[in-house]
Structures are given as structure tokens and as C-alpha cells.
Image: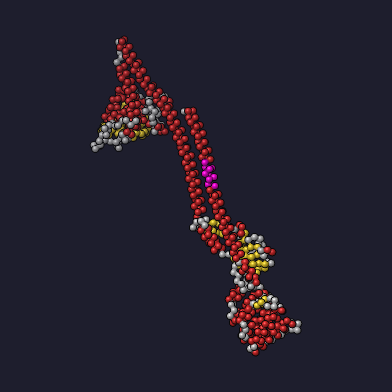
Amino acid sequence: MPRRLLPTLVALALGLAGLGVGLGYLHRIFAAEREDARTSLRSRREALEQYARAALGQALREGMEDTRDTRAAAKEDPLVATPGLYLREQGEQVLPRMAQFDTAGDAPAKERYARLRAGTEVADEDEGPWKERLERLALVEQSLKAKDRKATQLSLMALLQHRTRFVLASTRDLPSLLVVLEDVAARGDVVPDLMRGLVRDGLVDGQGGGRLEGLQRLLLLKRSRFTPEDFDFLRERVAALSTRVGVPVADFEARVRELATSPLPMPANVQEPMLTRSGWYLEPLSGGDVRGLALDLPGLLAELTREMRERGLLEADGRVTLSVDAAVVPLTSLPMAVESSMWARSEDALERRYRLKTWMLALCAALALIIAALAFVAQQRKYRFLELKSDFVATVSHELRTPLASIRLLAETLEWRVAEGADAKDYPARIIREADGLGFLVENLLSFNRIDKGRWVPKLAPVRLDELVSNLRRDLESGAPVPVELTADVDARELNADAQLLRLLLANLARNACAYNTRSPVRLHVQTLPGGRVHFTDNGTGIPASEWERVFGEFYRLSGRGGREVPGSGLGLALCRKIARLHGGTLRVAASSPEGTTFELTLPEYRPETRSTA
């Protein structure tokens, strides 16, 4: 049989190999599709991140341009507010404004103010401009005391003209101007616009002498010329004067408070637009100068997120994030990220589809293996069936030919002896025995076929077991090929069964015991047990434990002791089990040894309410 199965094995192996190659190629296609989908998803995400990066960069540049005028004005006017603006020129921080004071330990401006107020300030011989300034201050004081408005205005204008011609030290100029304006505000009736200009807005010299800054701007512009004590003193006096003459002072006080004590920690070298971790946007200018803008990054990102949602680029739960971990990040490589549940859902969908396709391939491979195994088993069973069929035909032919030959030989011998007048009284009995054996074989074959095809419906009726044993004893006495001793330990119980089938079952067990036996006589014992069980015991050669179940297979025959061939069709025990199952019972090997075998038959017992199914 292995040689017969070799072509089948080769064909199945080739088919499975081809299928494996095809499934592997298909799996690679599925994997490539998944990677392509992932690449497309990453490309879309990167495109959105690039869009967000470009949009944020555009917003930053526009914001920087929007503050150009404010930054230029702040360089000239110290009262201009510069919230969130940065400017560095020639390596020095211009904005935010620095609190750069004189480091001298005394307070010369405060002391000079006190001397001017007390009238004890005098000029040395070599201090001509300062001496002239003091003289003009004295003229203003005289005009004020005389309450001469016109003279006061003339003397004040003379003082201002002197300021335009001579630039004095700030520690002299500002205290002297402060003293005069305080006196004017306290005693004189000067034009309000003039006072506002002198205290805050400044004046333009009509003779081309330039601009005279007001006290507020002048103090802020010249802050580096004063010590901290002088600056605080002058700030208080200027603020008080501003309030007196009705000049705004809140922005002046705010600019003073905004003065930074130390430069912002900005990168020294700015070659391209960049973001700092502290939240500043910086742009390089010509000559190494840098301008910057403080950012509300959460607000910008929220606005960018809203815009992308309105454009349909993001779902409702999507958002744009920016993570600046380094000290500075170039604008062209901002670490933008577009977060959305859509990415996770898309990834999950890709994985689910890939896993489904993979499982389908695995299922196809498993089904192919199962089909191949089933095909191989079917082919094997086919060849096994053909062998069994061939063996069965040969066996039945042999079994039929032997009794037929015996019958013919006995008949010829009987004829010869009768013709010769010889004694031939046992020949008819022997012919009958051989004919009975032939009939039993045919009956086995027909009964097996009918039961196997489902064409035998048992005629259930109460059957006494002791009567079955009596019938079996008579059958053995007349038809057993060897001496048989049958003993029974049965009661008068009745079984709900088909009497003809049970008689055939017991006859097969008995003939099987005779065939696989080397003892003389053959001893058989039938015993009833509770629960509808019947034990059938013989003194045959026994059945190996590994064969206890296989002996009930169709066409299966054990070898006799010493390897001798035992006659039979291989259907006896198979027929017995089918009969037992047809009655709803069982038949098994209960025990076996070289001293004999015990079969246990279990059948339903008859009860009065049990009805026949005939």
C-alpha cells in the first residue's frame, strides 16, 4: 500500500507547496498594503504638521511686523509701552529697557536739588555755562516773586534757550529745571501747554536748536547718569509735579517699574528666525542686531487649531501642539505635532484589516492541510477497503470452497460405498455439518449486510436466556467442529430482544471460541449478572489487551497461536457488536488471558410494560 500512496503523497506535497508559495506571496502583498497605508497615514500627518508649522511661522512673522512701528517709537520715546518686545543693538539690550544707573555711592543730583532749593548753589570760576544757568534761574525766581507774568515767561524762555545752547551734566540740568518748574507751578500762571511740554511732551526749538525733552522723558532717557538714590528722588519729584500740573503720570510710573535689572537670557548668536524655550520669537537684523516678540503660544496654537478645524483639516477632538525642549529651536524645524483620535482609529483599522487577512490566510492554510490530510486518509481508506475487499473475497471464496469440496467428496465417497455395500452411516451427518457451516457463513454475510444497511428492524419480544443457552447447546452438539462443553449459570430472567439475532450473536461467540482454541474439549460458560449483563467465557488462547477493541472491526482477524491461520470471514465479532447496538446494548471484552476470554454483553431486561416494536 505505501507504494500505491506514493503518487498521492507527491501530488499532495506539490499542491501544498504551491499553495504555501501562493499564500506567502499573498501575505507579502497584505503586508505591503499595510505599510503603504501606514506611509500614506504618516504622509498625511506630516503634511498637516508642515501646514501647521508654516501657518505658525506666518503668524509669528506677521506679529513681528505688526510691532515694527511700536519698536521704532520705543527707541525714541521712553514713555512708549513695549510689552513683549525685545531689541538688541550692538550687543546691548535696548528693549525691554534696562535700569542702568551710575554706580557712584553718593547722590549728587539730590544734593544739588537741595542746594538749589536753599539758594546755596554757587558756580566756580571755570564753570561759565553753569554760572549763566544759575543767573537765569535767579531771574525766573525774581519774576515769580514779583508776580510779573510777562517777565516770568520771558525769563523762562531765556532759560530754555540757554539749555538749547549749552548741554550741561544731567545731575545739574535736570535738578535745576525741576526746581524752576516746581516754583512756576506753585506761584506762576504760565500757559498750560507750555507746562505740559516741559513736564512731559517736550518742546521743539523754533530756531532750529533741536528738541527739548520733558522732565518725564528726560529722566528716563538719562537714567544711566544718576545713581539709584538720585533716580528714585527725582522720580518722586517729577511724578508729584506731573500730578500738580495735570499731566498723565501712570505711564511714566509704569515705565519706571518696567526697567529690568538684568538682561533677558537670549542666545548670543541668532542666525535665523527661532523660538526660545522661554517663549520668545527672535529674528536677526543686519549688523548682528536682534528683534524679538514674546509669545502666547497656547493662544496661538488654540487659534491655529480652530482654523484647521474650520478648514476640515482636523476633527473636533484634534489639536496642534508644540514641544520646545531645547533652549532654542529654528523656525524651519519647529517640533509641531497634530494630535487626533483619527490617527489611532486609522491605525487600529489598519491592524484589524491586516489581522483579519492574516487569519484568513492561516485559515486557508489550515483548511488546505485538513483537506490534504482527509484526501490522504480517504485514499488510504480506499486502498485499505480494496485490500479488505480483496481479502474478503478470497476468504469467502476459500470458506465456501472448503465445505463445498468436503460435501462433494463425502457425497462421492457415500455413493461409492453404497455401490460397494460398505458402511457409510456417518457420512450423511458429516455432509449435514458441512452444509450447516456453509449456511452459517452465508447467514452471517446476509445478516451483516442487512444490519449494516439498516434494513433489519429487530422484532423485540421477551426472550428467556436459559432457552437461548439450550438452543446454543443443541447447535454446538450438532454442528461444532470440535468437542465442546457448555455450562451455564443463568436464571429465568427475560431480555427484551430479537430471539433470532441473539441466537446468531451467541453462535458467533461460540464458533469464535472454537476457532481460537487449542484445547480439547472447548469449554464455554454463560453467566447472568445484575443489570442485564451476560458474561460469555471460553478457554481459548486469549486476546492481547491492545487488540480488545480492534477485534470488533470489520474483516479484522487475529492470528492463531504459533502464527497459524484461523478460518473465518472476519465479520463474526463485528456482527455481534452491531447486534448488541441494534438492541441498545453493548458488547466488550471484559477480561482476557492465555487461559481464556470473557465477553460482557449488556442488554435491556424485559419488563411487563415494555412493548414490542415489531
Q: Is residue 493 above or below residue 206?
A: above
- Residue drawn where x is 47% and y is 37% of the image: 368
The spot of residue 76 in percent (x, y) is 65, 72
Q: Where is residue 333 in the image (x, y as percent from the top left)?
A: 61, 57
Is residue 453 rendered to the left or right of residue 195?
left
Considering the whole magenta stretch, tell me its main secondary structure. Answer: helix
Report whether residue 105 is seen. Answer: no
Where's the C terminus, which quadrant?
top left
* Residue 322 percent across, percent down from the top left: 56, 59
Q: Does the magenta stretch include residue 33?
A: yes
Q: Which colour scheme is used?
A: secondary structure
The residue at the far right in this view is 126
For residue 473: magenta? no
Q: How many labels does the image show?
A: 0
Q: In which quarter of the image is residue 211?
A: bottom right
Q: Which residue lies furthest to the bottom in this view?
A: 146
Q: Give the range drawn in magenta.
A: 26-36
Q: Residue furthest top?
A: 420
The residue at 38%/29% (across/down) is: 554
Closer to the camera in the image, 333 or 564 = 333
In the figure, is residue 488 to the left or right of 393?
left
Residue 347 seen from this side? yes
Tell me if residue 238 comes above or below residue 500 in the rendering: below
List the single residue furthest toward the front: 206
Q: Which residue is drawn at 58% across and 77% down?
A: 248
Residue at 34%, 33% (x, y): give it: 587
Q: Quadrant of residue 328?
A: bottom right
Q: Position of residue 527 (x, y in %)?
A: 30, 32
